[in-house]
Amino acid sequence: WGALIYECRGENCQWNGTFRGDNSPEGTYVFEIQFIQDGTEEIRRGEVVLVR
């Protein structure tokens, strides 16, 4: 828990389900997205389920 497994600094980013070159195990992953919209910093949090 608490490890950064993916980071993107651009548009249209997509996580391919790997961490350090290896397939991540199936399961629920929490995420936090930080971005600036109309000059205001926004944060979104949620979960994604990885199924192989």
Image: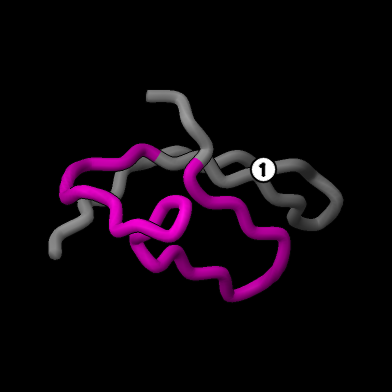
In the foreground, 25 or 34: 25
The stretch drawn in magenta includes residue 13: yes
SS assignment at label 1: strand
Reading the image, the residue beneath label 1 is: 42
The stretch drawn in magenta includes residue 26: yes
The image position of residue 37, as x and y in percent, is 74, 55
In screen coordinates, is 23 left or right of 52?
right
Residue shown at the point (17%, 44%) measured from the top left? 27
Residue shown at the point (48%, 69%) measured from the top left? 14
In screen coordinates, is 31 left or right of 48?
right
Q: How many marks?
A: 1
The residues colored magenta run 5-30
Residue farthest toward the bottom in the current orientation of the protein: 12
Residue shown at the point (79%, 45%) measured from the top left? 40
Image quadrant holding the N terminus, namely top left
- Amino acid carrying label 1: it is Glu
Residue shown at the point (71%, 67%) measured from the top left? 10
32 over 1 or under it: above or below = below
Q: Quadrant of residue 29?
A: top left
The image position of residue 36, as x and y in percent, is 76, 51
Residue farthest toward the right in the current orientation of the protein: 39
- Characterize the local packing of mark 1: few (<14), some (14-19) or many (20 or more) Cα atoms within 10 angstroms: few
In screen coordinates, is 49 left or right of 10?
left
